Amino acid sequence: MATSNRVGMQLRDRPEYENKPRPLTFAPEASVAEAVDAMCKKNFGSVIVVDPEDKVIGVMTERDVMRKLVHAGLDAKTTKLTEIMTHEPRVAQETDDVVDWLRIMSNDRFRRLPVVDQEGRIKAVFTQGDFVSYTWPDLVYQASQLARASLARNYAVWLIGGGIALYTLLMIIVVRSL
């Protein structure tokens, strides 16, 4: 992925980047039970599996626990993260373009994106929700533009309807005053 040349469009430029809590990280030999316990305590949906240098080697999500552990009938206390994690997940550089990753995550259907620094060490995890917060203002703007266009297109109807409503209100006032 190429570094973004557009001002304010790098992942690290997003307001939520600096405010994100440090990702939960575990070694691949850690038990699933340990990771799930930490996920529950912190209300996180995933853990990042890292090597001794804090470089991403895998991701384990709630979905991995359900499909690869619970459904398979494995024991969380004896199963290691490396056995159920997603190996070699896609990883973004903090200088990558927001829009590029928004498109990639949507097209490739994954929900969590580990973000690393120049040395490849984990810095943050972006979720689809983070990208929704990026697109939400644009969606609201587009909806307001559509509403305006619809109002302008139906101006005559609104004018006639408003006139009828005003006439009705005036007639009610006149009749009550008699």
Image: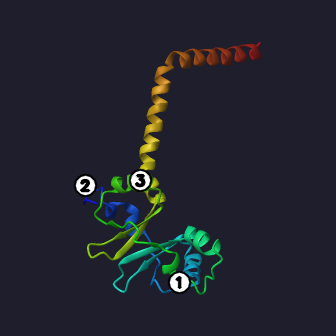
> Pointer 2: residues within 10 angstroms few (<14), some, or many (20+)?
few
Separation of residues labelled 1 and 2 (CA atoms): 42 Å
Asked whether, in this view, residue 91 is left or right of residue 112, the answer is: left
Q: Position of residue 43 (x, y in %)?
A: 56, 72
Q: Earlier in the sequence, mark 1 or mark 3?
A: 1
> Viewer-nearest of labels 1 and 3?
1
* Residue drawn at x 44%, y 38% as measured from the top left: 142
Give, as a three-letter code, the residue at label 3.
Answer: Tyr
**Quadrant showing the C terminus:** top right
Q: Specify the color scheme.
A: rainbow
> Viewer-nearest of labels 1 and 2?
1
Q: Position of residue 140 (x, y in %)?
A: 46, 42
> Pointer 3: residues within 10 angstroms few (<14), some, or many (20+)?
some
* Residue drawn at x 63%, y 82% as measured from the top left: 75
Would you name the residue on which mark 1 appears? 80
Separation of residues labelled 1 and 3 (CA atoms): 36 Å
- The disc placed on residue 7 is 2
Q: SS class of the residue under badge 3?
A: helix
139 over 101 or under it: above or below: above
Q: SS class of the residue under badge 1?
A: loop
Mark 3 in CB contact with mark 2 (< 8 angstroms)? no
**Quadrant showing the N terminus:** bottom left
Q: Earlier in the sequence, mark 3 or mark 2?
A: 2
Q: Position of residue 79 (x, y in %)?
A: 57, 83
* Residue drawn at x 58%, y 19% as measured from the top left: 162
* Residue drawn at x 47%, y 21% as measured from the top left: 153
Would you name the residue on which mark 3 appears? 134
Foreground residue, 158 or 49? 49
